[in-house]
Amino acid sequence: AQSVAQPEDQVNVAEGNPLTVKCTYSVSGNPYLFWYVQYPNRGLQFLLKYITGDNLVKGSYGFEAEFNKSQTSFHLKKPSALVSDSALYFCAGTGANNLFFGTGTRLTVIP
Amino acid sequence: NAGVTQTPKFQVLKTGQSMTLQCAQDMNHEYMSWYRQDPGMGLRLIHYSVGAGITDQGEVPNGYNVSRSTTEDFPLRLLSAAPSQTSVYFCASSYMGSSGANVLTFGAGSRLTVL
């Protein structure tokens, strides 16, 4: 079965430090991978996606993600974390018509 | 643009009651879907539609019905609510592209509690 996994339920990072939110995938064929963010009491918002080409994908709010085929990973990164980045982050992948999601990682940026 | 609009935002039901969660989008998206979000389980697909008159089941369809009579609307019906259906429900839509890499636009969510 196709799936994505987020191994960390919670990530804490100090403001100004780099952050990484991990995602691994199990998708047949060429994977289409996404990151979405959910702020409290809001719907999910799109951050970035990987379709093909450059393994480093840049997205909204200074986030980027690195696609690594050999490690089947698609980790979300940001060079310098902001307190306002605190939110729930979801990795997702496509299968046929539909998007399937990881279980989410709660990021807390500590001032 | 309003985007994806869900109503109601909050609802409390008793076991056995029925209700409909409404979803409307004004972006002329062909694809619409319903997800439920539960702690530790991420988002799970309930039903989806690739166009008016076409619906299909997702990962967790039991206890839910949908219809798609127009491009804009995709209501989710709970026929006989159960406590296991206590959750936050999200409607999402997108264009239908050939690549499958379409970005979903989400509504703000509907929090349902079944007593």
Image (cartoon, rainbow, N blue to C red):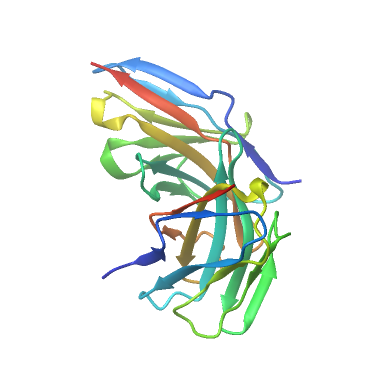
Answer with the quarter of the image where residue A81 lies.
top left
B31 with respect to A60 (left or right): right
Residue B26's place in the image compared with B4, above or below, is below
Q: Residue B76: percent from the left, percent from the top?
A: 57, 67
The percent position of residue A105, horizontal first and vertical second, equals 49, 30
Q: Determine the residue positioned at 67% across, 46% down.
A: B84
Q: Is residue A88 visible?
A: yes
Count numbered badges in the picture: 0
Asked if residue A11 lies left or right of residue A110, the reply is right
In this image, B18 relative to A37: left or right? right
Quarter of the rendering containing residue A14 = top left
Q: Quadrant of the N terminus of chain B?
A: bottom left
Quarter holding residue B5: bottom left
Asked if residue B97 shows in the view, the reply is no
Q: Residue at x 25, y 18 (%)?
A: A15
Residue extending furthest toward the right: A1
In the rendered image, residue B4, in percent from the top left (x then y), is placed at 38, 66
The residue closer to the viewer here, A12 or A19, is A12
Residue A87 coordinates in the image, percent (x, y): 37, 33
Residue A2 versus residue B80 in the image, above or below: above
